[in-house]
Structure formats: C-alpha cells, structure tokens
Amino acid sequence: MPELPEVEVVRAGLAPAVIGATITSVEVFDERALTRHTAGVVDFVDRLEGVSITAASRRGKFLWLPLATPGYALTAHLGMSGQMLLRVPNAPAERHERIRIGVEHPSHGRLAVVFADQRTFGSLAVDALVLDGSDSVPMQVQHIARDPLDAEFDDAAFIAAVRRRSSAIKRILLDQTVISGIGNIYADESLWAARIHPETDGRALSAQAVRRLLNEARLVLHKALAEGGTSFDAQYVNVNGEAGYFAHSLNAYGRGGQSCPRCGGEIRRAAFMNRSSHYCPRCQRRRRVGG
C-alpha cells in the first residue's frame, strides 16, 4: 500500500498542474472508484465540472484538492494500488483506468488527471471540509492523526500515547489514529534504525526510546521522499508514471534471510497482522515490561 512518501510525491507532482485549474470534464468508467462518494456518479460529476481547484493537500495516505466551491474538496484514497496520473488531453486510456478528469490551467493549458487502480480498493469522492486545529480536512480524514513530518505533530503527545499502550510498537505505528502515513515498509525501516524489536510493548519503551524511534522515522521518510518513494512494482509511481527508488536503500523490509547491514546477523521475516515483519533479532532485542 502506498505510504506517506508515495502519496506526498503524487501530491507534489499534481500541485503545479492543478492549482488554479478549472475542471472541464469528468468521466467515470467504473463506479467502484466512487465507493467513498455515496451520492453516486451523477452527483460526483455535477459537483466537479466547471469548478476550480484551489490547493493540493495531504494527511497520511489521503490527498485532497480543495475546490472553489466553499467547504468542499476532491478527496482521494489510493488504497493498495491507486495511481493519480497526469496525461495530455486525448491520451490513450491507461490500464485499469477508472476515472478521467479534464482540467484547463491558465499556464499549462489542458491536461487530464487519470485515476487508475488495479485492485479497486482506492476511491475518489467530493467531501465536505471540517476544521481540525488550524487545518481544513475532509470529513473522511478527520479521524486520521497528523504525520511525523507535519509541522503541528505533537511529539510529547505521541510519546505519551505509545508508553501507555500494551500493544506491540509496530501495531501502534500502523494505527493511523495515533500517527499517520507509516505503513509496513517504513515501520520496519524505522524500527530497525532505532534498534527496537517490532513486538516490544509500547509501555516497555522509555520516553528516550520512543523519541529516538520518532526521529529515525522522520529520517527514513525524508530519505524516501528524496528518492521518490518505494517501488517494488509498476503500481507505485508518481504522476508521470515513474517508479521510486527507495527500495534499493532498504535495510530490513523484504530482506528476510539476508545479513543485517549493521551487525551481520540474519534478518528474520515473521508473520504480523496478515503481513510480514522484518527485523534483526541480534540488534533489535525485544524488551519486556519492567525489564
């Protein structure tokens, strides 16, 4: 599933092409791409055509384009395989194309914003905006916590939240109501960098250890952003269809059976929440409560 760096790369790529643009046409080829827009296709089209886009925003794995219609935004969740692609007008249909939105920008002219999704778990919607602190976020996003790269992320509140939980620290990292934007890949990488076993209870960690983990998570995310996100297959691409390269920099994730780059021990792959964890049992020792 795309994580914070992948979604931010998409947002940053869309921004210059859509901010200030007017939506000229909306074509919905698969209604499954509107599962989050319960009012249906006709309402979705009517709310967008002729309306200008005023910004491009993101929180966690959600991105949204606020509209000139006060209090509303075109909201996207990429699911497991969703892509937002920029194409020239009349470009051939993309494989797994679900929705095509034509826009006209005062500087860039006409473009098409294509939503393609192989597994159909992603969705677009026109959603009402609500206030969350100093931000306006779609209603579908208001339960999502700020991510660690957000200027208003509260480090102290996060540390306290982790230390009062008996859940495994990796499970906490994946809880988007506690901290957003971190999925399986970057959780493994952040925990490896902080030398923390993924199954360590949150309450077994010191404030210093949680702070170290948070700092390492930020470094991992910044590095992934600089390299365009992680790409293991053609589904994880930017708006131009180009894959990221952070997969070449992974220290733990996907390296089960290989040597730990830090200590030389063998990276272990273990089942975790219907997916896998990757960690080094030699330099990521599991701490027990009171131990």
Image (tube, rainbow, N blue to C red):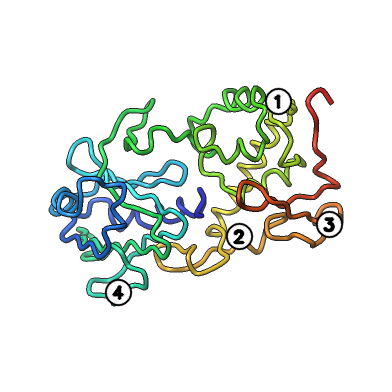
Mark 4 touches mark 1? (CB < 8 Å) = no
| Residue 18 image label | none
Viewer-closest of 105 and 228: 228
Label 4 packing within 10 angstroms: few (<14), some (14-19), many (20+): few
**Of callouts 2 and 4, which one flags the residue occurring earlier in the amino acid sequence?**
4
Q: Quadrant of residue 101?
A: bottom left
Query: Mark 2 = which residue?
Result: 246
User: Looking at the figure, which quarter contains the C terminus?
Assistant: top right
Q: Is residue 16 left or right of residue 198?
A: left
Query: Residue sitting at 19 percent across and 43 percent down?
Result: 68
**Of callouts 2 and 1, which one flags the residue occurring earlier in the amino acid sequence?**
1
Three-letter code, disc 4: Ala
Disc 3, SS: loop
Query: Mark 1 = which residue?
Result: 203
Q: Position of residue 288 (x, y in %)?
A: 80, 30
Query: Mark 3 = which residue?
Result: 266
Query: Residue sitting at 39 percent across and 63 percent down?
Result: 117
Mark 4 touches mark 3? (CB < 8 Å) = no
Q: Is residue 131 left or right of residue 178?
A: left
Residue positioned most to the bottom: 92
Disc 2, SS: helix
Query: Residue sitting at 37 percent across and 44 percent down?
Result: 57
Query: Mark 4 = which residue?
Result: 93
Disc 4, SS: loop
Image: 216 above or below 208: below
Mark 2 touches mark 1? (CB < 8 Å) = no
